[in-house]
Each structure stands twice: as structure tokens, then as C-alpha cells.
Amino acid sequence: MRLIHIISDIMKKYSSRPAIGERDYEYIENPLTKETSIKLLPQYKTITFQQLWDRVEHIANEWYYHPQYQLNDGDKVAILAFTSSDYVCIDIACIRLGAISIHLQTSSTKEQMQ
């Protein structure tokens, strides 16, 4: 059984259960400098396995059916992001399409990424 079939079965079996939780936040703008920063809030927001799977399917479909940049089995996808629910969705969407996800360190220098 392929990995994506196992993931799909899990998503369906536990569809109503929470899958991912992450700290809620809000954007705060400094009135003097106009810089925006993130303020972490005391609560967490969660998404269910069904919501996670829906997001994965939307990403995978957009990539697969994109008129100019279609993503196919074996193509490589570089991911440069902080850990989040979006990161998980992108990674599973790669698995869904058979693409190879390449995880890049956000702390890497330009020279290290070349």
C-alpha cells in the first residue's frame, strides 16, 4: 500500500477529530515605526483531519492543474517555511502528487542554499 493511501485512510477514519493545533496570534503594528510584529495569544486553534485533508487536496489540485507550472510525480518542491499547519499541508500535498519535498532551513544563508 502506498504512503498516500495510508494517509488518506487515516484522514477519513479520524475526520472529525483534531489533527493539528497551533498557537493563535495577532498582528500588532508599532505606531511609531509602522513595523508589524506577531503577538502570541493564550489560546490554540485546531483543525480536524477532514479540514487538513481538504487543504491538502486544494493545494495538490492547484499544483497538478496549474496551466503553466504543473507539478507531476517526481518533481521537486523546495519548502522554506517555519513549522505550521500550512507547512504540514504543503508536505502532504507533495506526497499526494508523488513530488519530492526538499525542506530548507530558514536560518540558512544564501551561500548554503545554492
Image (tube, rainbow, N blue to C red):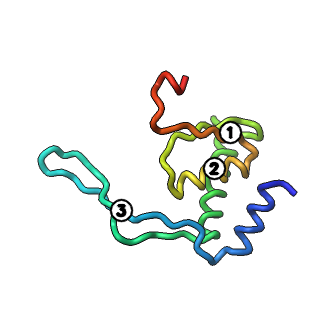
Above or below residue 107? Residue 37 is below
Return the mark for residue 25: 3
Q: Left or right? Give the position of 93 relative to 21.
A: right
Q: Position of residue 84 (x, y in %)?
A: 50, 55
Q: Residue at x 57, y 41 (%)?
A: 79
Disc 2 secondary structure class: helix
Residues at marks 1 and 2, CA–CA distance in whole angstroms: 17 Å
Q: Which mark is residue 30?
A: none
Which residue is disc 1 drawn over? 70
Name the side, left or right, on which 23 lies relative to 96.
Answer: left
Q: Amino acid at mark 3?
A: Tyr
Specify the quadrant of the image occupied by residue 77. Answer: top right
Q: Residue at x 59, y 40 (%)?
A: 103
Q: Amino acid at mark 2?
A: Asp
Q: Which residue is mark 2?
A: 91
| Disc 1, SS | loop
Q: Is residue 107 above or below residue 113?
A: below
Tell me, yes or no, whether the two marked residues, 3 and 1, touch with CB atoms within 8 Å. Answer: no
